[in-house]
Image: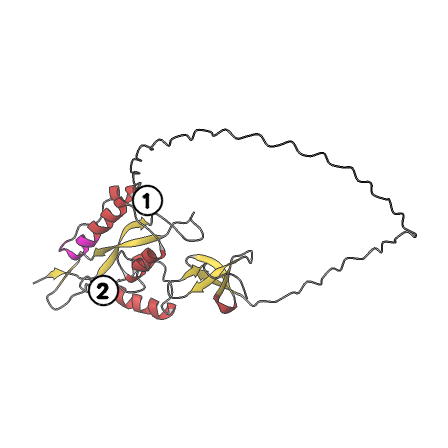
Amino acid sequence: MPSQCIGRRTSSVDITFADCPRLHKNKPLLFLLPKRCSASVTEHHTLCKECDVRRISTENQLEKRFGKYIPNQGSMLHGTIDGPIPAWSRIYKGPWWHAQIEKGYTMSEEAIRISEEASMAAVAKDGALPTAEMAKKVKAVVAPVVAAEPLEAPVPVPVPVPVPVAPAPAPAPVKKRFIKKVVPSAPIGIVATTPHKPTPTIKKVNIKRKEIAGRSLFLGPKDKVYDTKYKYLGRYDSRSDSINTAYPDSD
């Protein structure tokens, strides 16, 4: 008896994080939504032919990238719906997604609603996909605005009554003192000095070009990251393929 394939794919709808603590906020960070394959398989198989081809292609990609950031994840197989989301996958509620939330990324209420609907549909039989109207709503996701609580009326503060102060006594007259002018016996010469200009020290640093978080940057010793104008940005974190800005350029 035929059944539905259990391959986990990705929806064509990408969701944008609302708040971006990354260096370049003009390029928002996206994550993917899960989608169950709708193809039918026989009772002796769990994956359809296309998902099985994707599985082999995904394994080759992982071996080629050595666990680093993998682009074009929409064409890959992200495991099966009855298994965990892979660590490299950028699917909602996977290990990578949870790591971004811990870094300070947030989601709007609309983005959370659409992501939850897609997650429930992915594990349901013949799960429905997010519609085109959903995609239009999340193209410019903003953080939800929380209304401020009304402030209590200020308690009036009593104004202190000024206390009369007796006038201060008039100051005593100051006696004039005459200072005898002293004429030096010989003029004092001033020796002009020439300012010393230190010689700058030039230090050579070996760097190499590297793609980090979708950007073409330079990677130097001790995992230091520089932009294309050789400006120091931070330290490279290979586990999340991101830049840690907490380290200053101190050495």
Task: Judge the density around disc 2: few (<14), some (14-19), many (≥20) Cα neighbours within 10 Å.
Answer: few
Going 12% across and 65% down the picture, which residue do you hit?
42
Give the secondary structure at mark 2: loop
The spot of residue 213 in percent (x, y) is 41, 58
- Locate residue 199: give its quadrant: bottom right
Instruction: Calculate the distance from the C-alpha at mark 2 to the C-alpha at mark 1.
Output: 29 Å
Residue where numbered disc 1 is placed: 143
The spot of residue 242 in percent (x, y) is 41, 60
Task: Judge the density around disc 1: few (<14), some (14-19), many (≥20) Cα neighbours within 10 Å.
Answer: some
When the figure is inspected, residue 127 is found, relative to residue 5, above or below; the finding is above
Going 58% across and 67% down the picture, which residue do you hit?
205
| Earlier sequence position, callout 2 versus callout 1 | 2
When the figure is inspected, residue 206 is found, relative to residue 158, above or below; the finding is below
The segment highlighted magenta reads 119-126
In the image, is 185 to the left or to the right of 201? right
Q: Nearer the viewer, residue 126 or 149?
A: 149
Q: Which mark is residue 84?
A: 2
Mainly helix, strand or loop, the magenta region? Answer: helix
Going 34% across and 67% down the picture, which residue do you hit?
61
The spot of residue 184 in percent (x, y) is 89, 50
**Disc 1 marks which amino acid?**
Ala
**Disc 2 marks which amino acid?**
Pro
Q: Quadrant of the N terminus?
A: bottom left
